[in-house]
Image (cartoon, helix red, strand yellow):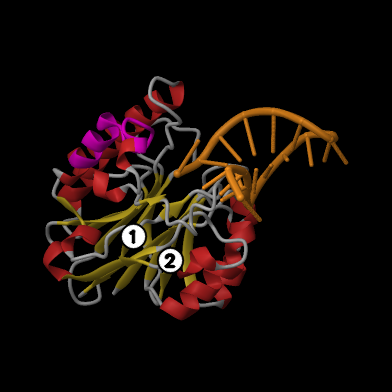
Amino acid sequence: MKLATWNVNSLAVRLPHLLAWLAEQQPDVIVLQETKLTDDKFPAAELQAAGWHAHWFGQRTYNGVALLSRGAACVDATRNIPGFDDEQARVIAATLPASGGADLRIIGAYFPNGQAPGTDKFAYKMRWLDALRAWVADELTRHPRLVLMGDFNIAPEDRDVHDPAAWAGQIHCTPEERAHFQALVQLGLHDAFRLFEQPPKLWSWWDYRNLAFRKNQGLRIDHILVSDALKPLVTACSIDKAPRKAERPSDHAPVWAEIAL
DNA sequence: ATGACTCCCAGTGGGAGA
């Protein structure tokens, strides 16, 4: 089973890119971030025509998430973090019914950017992360096979940053954000990317400005975290830079993982 | 060449992203 996450930075603009990547890479499940579409505008018909079941949760201009699955539809969908009052559409979760074994719980999330330490947006990011951790801990008690994936807006370690000195203490790289990432890991989750030897300087996001992609100046901020029960079943994880080379690309590249399910 | 973005909603600029 192949799982993927991609911040598409406007699904209205990126639908052709998405359909092309899905046809080429044939994942079984993909979660999307920054769809930037109200629910009435979600391209459900186009995706269905391509063979995809979908759950979606969006708003205009900003944010917006979706969860697509091929073959079986996901059930028990949840929008945002239960009990956390949030005006921003950032989380979609659902369960992929078992094909022999136990169900697979999938959480797709668009973590807040946070802007800069000391701002209201950073405080919101911290509150959101607190709520997410408490909820994921609860989900794990019900779903031992769980995947948390999406745009975390956190570079977990210096090796996930093209220029750690320049980024030290900056948004995505603050000790507070990294502590939150570790707190998620300590729930019994594993960064699928780091389960394998990886080429150095492989990022998931490059700034549109300053020819950052051409110079490979990026960050690894999009992640797939798998639960303890899934860890031994993960057979591969990588980041596909190819869509970042397309015409009018998203600033993020898709991350994917193979799980023997 | 020591520069250099893209999205949205607005409306011919500004905020946000990361």
Q: In which quarter of the image is the C terminus of chain A?
A: bottom left
SS at circle 2:
loop
Which class describes the residues within 10 Å of circle 1: few (<14), some (14-19), or many (20+)? many
Q: Which amino acid does label 1 sit on?
A: Leu
Please name the residue that numbered disc 2 is placed on.
A241
Where residue A252 appears, as percent x and y from the top left, is: 46, 56
Task: Say which quarter of the image contains residue A101.
Answer: bottom left
Q: Are marks 2 and 1 in contact (CB under 8 Å)?
A: yes
| Magenta stretch holds residue A180 | yes
Q: Is residue A237 on the magenta stretch?
A: no
In this orientation, does residue A244 appear? yes
**10 Å crowding of disc 2: few (<14), some (14-19), many (20+):** some
- Residue closer to the observer: B14 or A228: B14
Image point (14%, 62%), residue name = A231
The subunit letter for the residue under badge 2 reads A
Tag shown at residue A166: none
Q: Which amino acid does label 2 sit on?
A: Lys
**Magenta stretch bounds:** A166-182
Secondary structure state at the residue bearing disc 1: loop
The location of residue A144, given as percent across then percent down, is 16, 56
Q: Residue at 44% x, 21% y: name it.
A: A119
Is A261 located above or below residue A78 in the figure?
below
Residue under numbered circle 1: A202
Give me the chain letter of mark 1.
A
The image quarter containing residue A193 is bottom left
- Distance between the Cα atoms at labels 2 and 1? 9 Å
In percent of width and height, residue A184 lies at 21, 42
- Residue A149 rendering spot, x and y as whole percentages: 33, 54
